[in-house]
Image: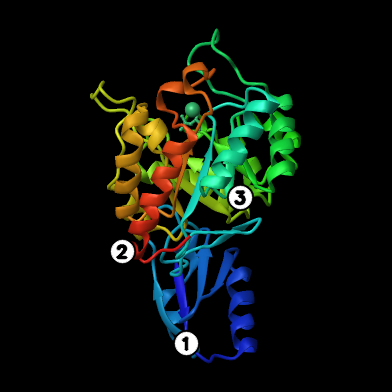
Amino acid sequence: MVVVIKKGSEERQLNNLISWVKGLGLDVNRVDGENSTILGLVGDTSVVDIDLINSIEIVDKVQRIQEPYKAANRKFHPDDTVIKVGDNEIGGKNFTFIAGPCSVESEEQIVEVAKAVKAAGATVLRGGAFKPRTSPYAFQGLKDAGIRLLLEAKKQTGMPIITEIMSVAHLDLFADVDIIQVGARNMQNFDLLKELGRSDKPIFLKRGLANTVEEWLMSAEYIMSGGNNRVILCERGIRTFEPYTRNTLDLSAVPLVKEKTHLPVFVDPSHASGLSRLVRPLSLAAVGAGADGLIIEVHNNPECALCDGAQSLRPEQFEDVVNRVKVMLPLVDKKI
Ligand code: PEP
Ligand code: MN
């Protein structure tokens, strides 16, 4: 339930209302937006008498929220959420490039790719240390050593880093990681989501391979209901009957999710297609659809990559994507 407060209301009256609602056993999420103050009431709101709240002097209107996701709902928070990571502001009118290899393979590799993607325009470095591979015989990532190498690349380039977590048990290893990624395969690992809800780090939540938009937003709600509102969503393609691409990029999800939530929405054209030659057109399409950023796999030597070489761009191809996206940004009212 959302309670919209009249402009210019007294803080004292507002605090009285908040205490009264909390006394009913509900949590209150206060958002001071540009145009209004909104109280989001979370919990069993059947105990609330809407007419009674409506009759309070400072209340402009009361609205029940039908959707099962509350904190992630745009009705709770009409303005776009902007998440600060290092010098980056993610979301709102900002457009952000995250780039780097699928997996961290060696110090030489990650540092070289980090320098190259930074020079091309990326402002966050990606690299997998714990890899969720379909086959147990495939390269599983360098694990804690991989995180140490990412931190070395961060030291040398100044770029914040994002890497995927697979287990709650590894959380301590992520202490110096700037953004924690929850991969598609873990989107509904509810114990992990709950634990990340207690963290203060931004969480990059990828859409599951076969999950609906509502399930995806409910996973964001798991994190947010624990107190961590710094969630970034990422559409990375869903499984359909089409075998020519690795997944099917659900581009319509981008404007749809931006309508339903206030969270930043990214697109991953690399995992969506599995084909490096499709990354550029899908990137441009994602910008047109209103994405807040792109996460793109870039490798200095894709033929020899230990994971996802076929979908990885070379640094110069990534730079070409960045330059073309820059031309498009004014059309979608965004800036780098
Ligand atoms: C990745 O980003 O390397 C990855 C494994 O992505 P996804 O979870 O989207 O498959
Ligand atoms: Mn990958």
Report which quarter residue 21 is drawn in: bottom right
Report which quarter residue 290 is drawn in: bottom left
Question: Disc 2 marks which amino acid?
Answer: Leu
State the CA–CA distance, disc 3 to disc 2: 28 Å
Residue with the mark numbered 3:
202
State the CA–CA distance, disc 2 to disc 1: 35 Å
State the CA–CA distance, disc 3 to disc 1: 32 Å
Q: Please indicate, yes or no, whether residue 67 appears anywhere in the rendered image.
A: no
**Residue 6, label in figure:** 1
Of mark 3 and mark 1, the one earlier in the sequence is 1
Element assignment for label 2: helix
Q: Please indicate, yes or no, whether residue 228 appears anywhere in the rendered image.
A: yes
Of mark 2 and mark 1, the one earlier in the sequence is 1
326 shown above or below 285 = below
* Label 3 close to label 1 by CB (< 8 Å): no
Question: Which mark is nearer the camera, 2 or 1?
Answer: 2
